[in-house]
């Protein structure tokens, strides 16, 4: 044991002493450290430990040097996927020598956040968490009383999360998986200190690696694959949004319906890009040639375009149209595959009771969530991905397919086009040409040699840049830049 290692142990004991005393473990932990200190460094070790326990100047110095990274865990939504992301990132940061503390603020434990006030952390990280919006009775954000930069990773369009950006702490950075989303945050939420691109990462199926976090290329690529073609995703019935969209259409003077039609014609635009394009088209119309309602709509479009806040509010309110368009196109993709008679393994309970249950060629399986899906990708020759409108984004689903050897068929994104090669690392299809998808699927399913080539290329690239170790390195770079 080095003197620095001993100092670090003393610091950690002191930092955790309230919790250890409460749990009745402090004396036992302290005894071990005392015995190690006397054995290696003599009486000076006792003096240093005492200086840590009373938390004077020496403790403050150690706290600045070694304070931990705090990561919020326990998020129950998305089948625990977000909680898994938090722990995976924490483990990757710990492998790089950082002290990691986890804190579960969910349920009735949210009030325990006050115990963090006044404490110093190297960083405080949450994965799409509400915690950074928690306020005291005075209206002040609790996290403004916790020392250290705050990072919240959002995995949806930022507009859906605006409550947690408008109500966030002062020292606040948004982490996102889509370059368009980063630009949107900078444009519409200038109070956010910074926004950085860090997509969620993928993992290799544990059984292939003997339960370790490492894998060799051959044991991934040579896995037994039982499913020729799979889709591991949810079904949402777009018709359920019709009543909301009708009411929204009335409130927006017919704009909601036009937005829906505009996005169906411009399927590669982000939501905000489509809304801006539609409003500009409406403003360019000759108001005198239309009815009074059309002129009202034109004036409304001019107002929204000229006011950032009005645009933000409309984009937030028009969310049902976005979900309706997304779900409609997803259903159209699935319908195209079913109509072509291509056997497809579906893994989601959301298909139960729908037209897909019992449809020719559809093999419906029990739902699998979180890390359980890794095995499904490892057993799939080819798998379908349909982006949830992340037009410049990267998702863990993409990374998981590549890292587990499932040849991916997907609509593309700016990230994929910049980091990978279409036809070499994945098989692309266009939302503008969904009718051609069945031919694309058949071609790759029937060509096992091409599958092997794509599988190998995708794995080799993804294993270098789509792991949680890679994301930890990226986060450390961001953290160091923010400290400079």
Image: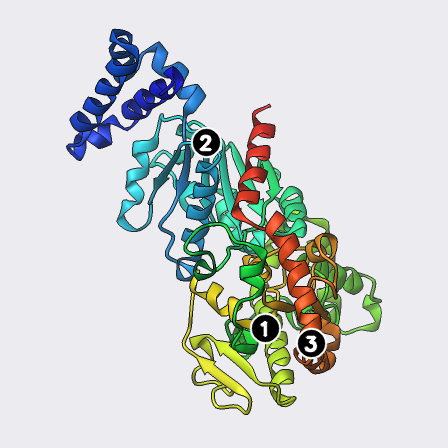
Asked whether residue 320 is in view, the answer is yes
User: Marks 2/3: CA distance?
Assistant: 44 Å
Query: Which of 76 and 417 lies nearest the eye of the viewer?
Result: 417
* Residue 266, percent from left and from top: 74, 68
Tell me what residue is drawn at x 31 percent, y 34 percent. Answer: 114
Residue 294 horizontal side relative to residue 335, left or right: right
Q: Distance of mark 3 from mark 1, alpha carbons?
A: 10 Å
- Labels 3 & 1 near each other (Cβ < 8 A): no
The answer to which quarter of the image holds residue 296 is: bottom right
Q: Position of residue 313 (x, y in %)?
A: 59, 54
Q: CA distance from mark 1 to mark 2?
A: 38 Å
Within 10 angstroms of label 3, few (less than 14), some, or many (20 or more) residues? some
**Where 160 falls versus 479 (above or below)?**
below
Which quarter of the figure has residue 454?
bottom right
Q: Which quarter of the figure is the N terminus placed in?
A: top left
In the image, residue 480 sits, relative to residue 225, either above or below, namely: above
Circle 1 residue? 381
Whichever of labels 2 and 3 marks the residue nearer the N terminus, that label is 2
Q: Which residue in the structure is indicated by mark 2?
A: 97
| Mark 3 secondary-structure assignment | helix
Ranked by sequence position, the earlier of labels 1 and 2 is: 2
Viewer-closest of 105 and 136: 105
**Mark 1 near mark 2, Cβ–Cβ under 8 Å?**
no
**Which numbered marker is on residue 33?**
none
Q: Secondary structure at mark 1?
A: strand
Total numbered circles: 3
Circle 3 residue: 444
* Residue plotted at (55% across, 32% down): 479
Within 10 Å of the Cα at label 1, are there few (<14), some (14-19), or many (20+) other Cα atoms? many
For the point 61% across and 76% down, the residue is 328
What x and y, as percent, mark residue 93? Answer: 47, 38
């Amino acid at each position: 044991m080095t003197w620095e290692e001993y100092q670090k142990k003393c610091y950690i004991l002191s930092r955790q002493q309230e919790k250890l005393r409460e749990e009745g473990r402090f004396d036992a932990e302290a005894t071990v450290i005392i015995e190690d200190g006397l054995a290696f460094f003599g009486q000076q070790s006792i003096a240093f430990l005492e200086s840590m326990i009373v938390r004077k100047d020496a403790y403050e110095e150690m706290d600045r040097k070694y304070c931990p990274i705090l990561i919020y865990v326990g998020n129950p939504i998305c089948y625990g996927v977000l909680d898994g992301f938090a722990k995976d990132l924490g483990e990757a940061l710990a492998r790089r020598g950082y002290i990691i503390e986890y804190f579960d603020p969910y349920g009735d434990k949210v009030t325990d956040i006050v115990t963090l006030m006044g404490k110093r952390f190297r960083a405080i990280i949450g994965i799409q968490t509400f915690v950074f919006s928690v306020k005291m009775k005075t209206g002040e954000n609790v996290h403004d009383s916790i020392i250290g930069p705050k990072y919240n990773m959002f995995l949806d369009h930022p507009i859906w999360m605006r409550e947690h950006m408008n109500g966030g702490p002062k020292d606040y950075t948004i982490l996102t998986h889509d370059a368009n989303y980063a630009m949107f945050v900078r444009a519409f939420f200038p109070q956010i200190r910074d926004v950085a691109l860090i997509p969620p990462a993928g993992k290799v199926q544990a059984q292939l690696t003997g339960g370790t976090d490492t894998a060799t290329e051959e044991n991934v690529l040579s896995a037994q694959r039982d499913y020729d073609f799979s889709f591991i995703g949810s079904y949402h019935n777009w018709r359920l949004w019709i009543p909301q969209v009708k009411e929204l259409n009335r409130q927006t003077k017919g704009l909601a319906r036009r937005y829906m039609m505009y996005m169906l014609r411009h399927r590669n635009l982000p939501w905000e890009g489509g809304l801006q394009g539609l409003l500009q088209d409406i403003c360019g119309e000759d108001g005198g040639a239309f009815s009074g309602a059309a002129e009202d709509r034109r004036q409304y479009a001019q107002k929204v375009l000229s006011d950032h806040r009005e645009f933000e509010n409309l984009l937030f309110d028009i969310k049902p149209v976005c979900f309706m368009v997304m779900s409609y196109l997803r259903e159209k993709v699935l319908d195209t595959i079913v109509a072509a008679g291509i056997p497809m393994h579906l893994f989601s309970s959301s298909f139960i009771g729908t037209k897909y249950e019992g449809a020719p060629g559809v093999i419906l399986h029990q739902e699998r969530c979180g890390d359980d899906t890794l095995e499904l990708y490892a057993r799939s020759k080819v798998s379908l991905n349909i982006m949830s409108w992340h037009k410049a984004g990267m998702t863990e689903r993409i990374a998981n397919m590549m890292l587990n050897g499932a040849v991916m068929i997907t609509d593309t994104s700016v990230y994929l086009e910049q980091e990978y090669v279409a036809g070499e690392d994945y098989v692309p299809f266009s939302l503008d040409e969904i009718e051609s998808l069945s031919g694309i699927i058949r071609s790759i399913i029937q060509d096992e040699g091409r599958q092997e080539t794509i599988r190998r290329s995708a794995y080799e690239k993804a294993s270098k840049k789509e792991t949680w170790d890679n994301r930890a390195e990226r986060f450390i770079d961001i953290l160091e830049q923010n400290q400079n």
